Image: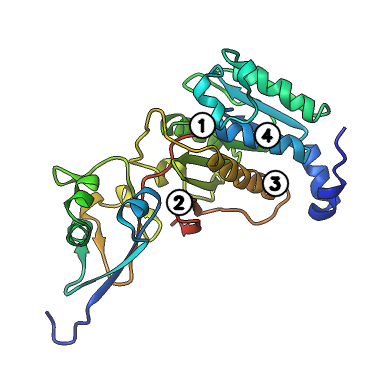
């Protein structure tokens, strides 16, 4: 069992209680999803849904922290669940072996959706599902030494499909392992802030640039 | 130019790969007329950064996919694309977003 006293004293008992009672959907358990899922489980999120259709491949191991060479060829969601349960056996973890595309439906009773996907087409589809259900979405994306994070709140903020209209997907995005660690951590910070009613990156796009060691915000209008 | 016209200033911020490639994070451009089109701004930038800059962003007189251009925080594709009008004090943010996860 995890003793949460070191963070509950910082976040407050009420916030910690909310985390225990929260249900978070993690879309994609690749580089960002591994960081996000692990930090959410360590934070005490009560219920976590993990969705991915891929298996662990050798090129994944430079940055997808939940997997090791022993996991090659196995489905990511099931390996991730197994590792996460070892970290926090009390967490309810539901793996969904599926691609997020037409026909996919989000589970009931979600508090936050976290976008850890690897292409904009799927992201816009996920956003549409969350938007219709009124569920906040925390977006993260990475490439090379860079990444971005923003929070979408249905009816209040700009949508990803507006902000990133004209974005182009790359196959085999080059990236170093420490970039998703930082971006994933920033996403989890936003999830906890959403759940505990603290300020979030609403109508703001945060851009992380580890090549120039800068972190900047753009106000979205 | 009208007798009392002051130069129009536009701030252009480059992020991520553009910043890395062209070595600049922010540029302030001045124009002797107002407004100008985004196309004119991009051509002005190419005078500083070279044709390579323009070829990354523009193809057949239209914006290429891949790089997001925000004018005061709004995607120019939600406005008038390459013909979006830019006025004094406007801020443009240019970045290819990270698509990976």
The residue that label 2 is drawn on is: A211
Look at the numbered disc 1 and give the secondary structure of its residue.
loop
Subunit under mark 2: A
Residue on which disc 1 sits: A117
Residue located at (85% from left, 43% from top) = A4
Residue A20: horizontal and vertical position, in percent? 80, 38
Callout 3: 10 Å neighbours few (<14), some, many (20+)? Answer: many
Kind of element beneath mark 2: loop
Q: Residues within 10 Å of mark 4 (few under 14, many from 20)?
A: many
Q: Which mark is residue A34?
A: none
Residue assigned mark 4: A24
Provide the chain ID for the residue under circle 1: A
Q: Position of residue B27 (x, y in %)?
A: 31, 66
In the rendered structure, which disc, 3 or 1, sits on the residue that comes first in sequence?
1
Q: Which mark is residue A192?
A: 3
Q: Do circles 4 and 1 both sit on a common chain? A: yes
User: Residue extending furthest top?
Assistant: A73
| Mark 3 residue element | helix
* Disc 4 from disc 3: Cα separation: 10 Å
Viewer-closest of B79 and B71: B71
Q: How far apart are marks 3 and 2 (CA)?
A: 27 Å
């Amino acid at each position: 069992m995890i003793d949460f006293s070191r963070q509950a004293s910082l976040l407050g008992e009420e916030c910690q209680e909310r985390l225990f009672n929260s249900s978070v959907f993690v879309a994609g358990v690749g580089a960002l999803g591994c960081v996000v899922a692990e930090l959410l489980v360590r934070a005490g999120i009560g219920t976590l849904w993990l969705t991915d259709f891929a298996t662990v491949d050798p090129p994944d191991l430079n940055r997808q922290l939940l997997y090791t060479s022993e996991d090659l060829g196995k489905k990511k969601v099931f390996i991730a669940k197994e590792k996460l349960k070892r970290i926090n056996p009390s967490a309810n973890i539901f793996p969904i072996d599926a691609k997020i595309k037409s026909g996919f439906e989000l589970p009931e009773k979600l508090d936050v959706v976290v976008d850890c996907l690897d292409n904009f087409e799927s992201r816009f589809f996920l956003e549409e599902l969350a938007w219709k259900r009124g569920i906040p979405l925390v977006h993260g994306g990475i490439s090379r030494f860079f990444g971005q994070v923003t929070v979408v709140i249905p009816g209040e903020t700009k949508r990803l499909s507006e902000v990133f209209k004209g974005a182009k997907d790359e196959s085999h995005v080059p990236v170093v392992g420490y970039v998703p660690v930082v971006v994933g951590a920033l996403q989890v910070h936003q999830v906890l802030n959403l759940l505990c009613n603290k300020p979030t990156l609403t109508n703001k796009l945060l851009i992380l640039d580890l090549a120039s060691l800068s972190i900047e915000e753009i106000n979205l209008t | 130019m009208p007798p009392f016209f002051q130069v129009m200033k536009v701030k252009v911020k480059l992020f991520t790969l553009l910043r890395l490639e062209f070595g600049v994070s922010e540029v302030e451009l001045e124009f002797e007329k107002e407004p100008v089109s985004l196309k004119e701004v991009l051509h002005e930038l190419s005078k500083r950064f070279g044709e390579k800059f323009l070829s990354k962003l523009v193809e057949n007189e239209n914006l290429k996919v891949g790089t997001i251009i925000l004018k005061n925080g709004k995607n120019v594709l939600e406005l008038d694309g390459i013909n979006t009008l830019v006025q004094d004090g406007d801020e443009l943010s240019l970045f290819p977003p990270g698509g990976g996860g």
